[in-house]
Amino acid sequence: MVYISNLSDHVDEEVTLKGWVYNYRSSGSLYFVEMRDGSGICQCVVAQDAVSEEAWEQTEALRQETSLEITGKVVEDERSIGGHELQVTDLKIYQVAEDYPITPKEHGVEFLMENRHLWLRSQKQWAAMRVRNEIIYAIHTFFQERGFVQMDAPIFTGNAAEGTTNLFETEYFDDHAYLTQSGQLYGEAMAMAHGLIYTFGPTFRAEKSKTRRHLTEFWMIEPEMAFYDLDMNMDLAEDFVRFIVKRVLDRRPKELEILERDTSKLRKTAEEGFPRISYTEAVEQLKSDDMATMLDQMVEDRKQEAEELENEREEIEKERGQAKKWRKAQIDERVIEIGKRLDEIDEDLRNIPDWRESALNFEWGEDFGGSDETLLTMKYDTPILVHRFPAAIKAFYMKRDPKDEKLALACDMLAPEGYGEIIGGSEREDDLDTLKKRINEHDLPEDVFQWYIDLRQYGSVPHSGFGLGLERTVAWLCGLDHVRETIPFPRMMGRLTP
Ligand code: 4AD
Ligand code: MG
């Protein structure tokens, strides 16, 4: 089989492509068919006098998403989508698709989510899944090249790793089980057997949060390393994320272009070190005069930008009346662009006062909200690492800072551009008695954790690990504003189908 992604190996040859009609237009005796075959899109030109009568009849029957095979000569064409064009000699339909529901016009997101099984075929969705795949490949490459062993944690569990408030409970014969929130605790047992391990599996959170960052089912990558302290953990997390970003920039430039991703900040992430600040420093930053000034400046900048855009729109709309057809089209496109940007500015102007308020009133000991994370990363182009959080807001298994018992040796990585937390991790409590004490303090049943406690009984060592949320990483790298587009079939509050 020849695939569109490999057409450069077949220039001037006749090939047969199998796929679907992505788009088409006709002008008299010519048809321009944009065909997609899963690997890419190629323009196929059907000239009535170059094909049989039967093939021409088939061509005239084409509809969007009709499945077909097309035979033709491959020619290089810079201007063409994908860089090649097919001069068609034959065409055969598998099935005509009548009334495909997703047309090139704009649809509402609810409609698209209802049709997720079809929406996956659209170009941006396709590109996002390609980036997701590249990230997955990069993750395995990174760890495998460094001697980590990939091991699987169970999905059915009898214990809670990340607090008991967001567990999905299910029947388990005469007993009940929980769907895992994290593979970490098992990861720790596996690290004591293999030294360096990582899990890569689905995790579940019954969070009643309808935000653009929350799924109820998401994929988490959790490395766990024997003999690593918090600093080594953060070094690894940083190298890991930089590696992923580099690979996606190197290997998926076309997809990022389809997604219209501005890659300037991602390029910095691929090259520069990530700043590290303590939670206490982060709180100081949030409450600082600098933060207030920055936000006030932001409001001013946004207002000015909006004014300039509105002026531009007024001018080109005046020009439109007398404009030539091509210029009209250009103007229409620009007007849509301006409208979108103005909506974004509007949203910012509505949000910024709330962000400012919540930042200035932030109290040491609280957990960061989404807007706090956005503000903390605003100064930077790369992700940042925040470490040493108040122990009271973190999980039972985290080791305390020997220099300050109120603090946990935890670290979160916050992505820039408003994407927020992508990694959560820590050094683990490795002392038997302290761990037992923590389990009791958190009102957790000691009996179901007995196996975990055993790890501190038989050859306990310092160890650390972290968890990367795959979907949040995909959203960030693709520049998508909601995690629902980062996984083939998202599961969220209020969404279980398709
Ligand atoms: O910070 P979290 O809860 O950390 C853990 O579960 C640790 N046990 C990890 C470890 O140390 N091995 O989750 C880790 C990451 C978050 O930073 C976020 O990227 C992602 O998982 N995540 C979610 N992604 C989508 N939807 C949700 N509801 C998520 N909850 C967490
Ligand atoms: Mg977290």
Image (tube, helix red, strand yellow):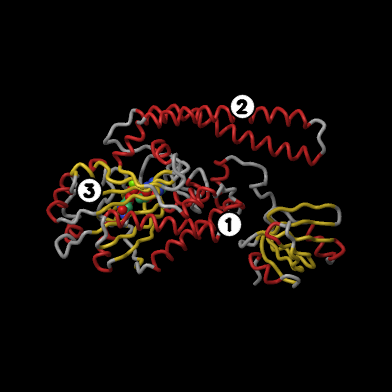
Give residue 307's mark.
2
SS at mark 3 in the image: loop
Amino acid type of the residue tagged 1 in the rendering? Pro
SS at mark 2 in the image: helix
Residue found at the far right of this picture: 49
In space, the residues marked 1 and 3 are separated at their CA atoms by 42 Å
Q: Residue at x 30, y 65 (%)?
A: 196
User: What residue is pinned by disc 1?
Assistant: 253
In space, the residues marked 3 and 2 are separated at their CA atoms by 51 Å
Residue 216 in view, yes or no: no
Q: Residue at x 44, y 59 (%)?
A: 243
User: Which one is in front in this view, the residue at disc 1 or the one at disc 3?
Assistant: 1
Residue 464 in view, yes or no: yes
User: What residue is pinned by disc 3?
Assistant: 396
Q: Earlier in the sequence, mark 3 or mark 2?
A: 2
In space, the residues marked 1 and 2 are separated at their CA atoms by 34 Å
Q: Earlier in the sequence, mark 1 or mark 3?
A: 1
Figure quadrant of residue 58: bottom right
